[in-house]
Image (spheres, rainbow, N blue to C red):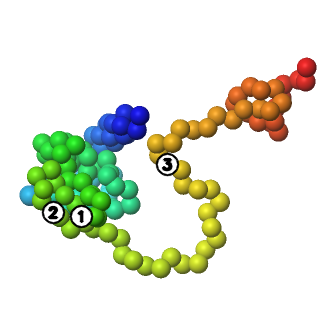
Amino acid sequence: MHRTKIEEKVQQKIAKGEVYSVTPFMNGIFGVSIGTTFLNVDIIKRTCTYWYKFPMQELIYSGSFSGIETHDMPMVANDGLVRSITGEVFLSLNPSHTKRPPDRPRKKRIESQFQDKRTVSCSRCHTSGHNRKTCKNPLS
């Protein structure tokens, strides 16, 4: 079940990444320009100058641009090392270990991207799409 959702997400990222202009450099390094921003994407080391979301649409598109299949790209193993399909080991780029500043807890938890949305149903008229507080159906 999750496999098809992951495939859909990868295809969406590839389609979204195709609008970016990609310039190949050497040894698997690509330059990706997004508007006025220019990013360096290294496919072999699996690093990018914009590290917030990973794998990024730029990285996936760069992989398809370079002739490397998206599914053959290096992956992070359970031990935290980045391994290629052939078994090569690369050091992974992890964020620095910094203490989080004191702050209030989140009001809403971060939901999984593969979790289905829950439909709201009214306890008064038993239809979906609204709740009891916003129900406008007359009592019968």
x and y, in percent, of residue 17 in the image: 30, 43
Instruction: Specify few, some or many for label 2: CA neighbours under 10 Å numbering under 14, 14-19, or 20 or more.
Output: some
Q: Which is nearer the eye, 79 or 20?
A: 79
x and y, in percent, of residue 126 in the image: 77, 26
- Indicate left or right for 101 with 43 as reference: right
Residue farthest along the right direction in this orientation: 140
Residue in view at x 8 percent, y 58 percent: 26
Instruction: Specify few, some or many for label 1: CA neighbours under 10 Å numbering under 14, 14-19, or 20 or more.
Output: some
Q: CA distance from mark 2 to mark 1?
A: 7 Å
The answer to whether the residue labelled 2 contacts the one labelled 1, judged by CB atoms less than 8 Å apart, is yes
x and y, in percent, of residue 4 in the image: 37, 33
Residue in view at x 40 percent, y 38 percent: 2
| Quarter of the image that includes the C terminus | top right
User: Which picture quadrant has residue 68?
Assistant: top left
The image shows residue 102, relative to residue 28, as above or below, that is below
Q: Which residue is mark 3?
A: 112
Disc 3, SS: loop
Q: Is residue 39 visible?
A: no
Q: Is residue 60 visible?
A: yes
Q: Which residue is mark 1?
A: 81
Q: Could you tell me the amino acid type at mark 3?
A: Ser
User: Which picture quadrant has residue 94?
Assistant: bottom left
Q: CA distance from mark 2 to mark 3?
A: 29 Å
- Indicate left or right for 129 with 136 as reference: left
Q: Which is nearer the eye, 70 or 86?
A: 86
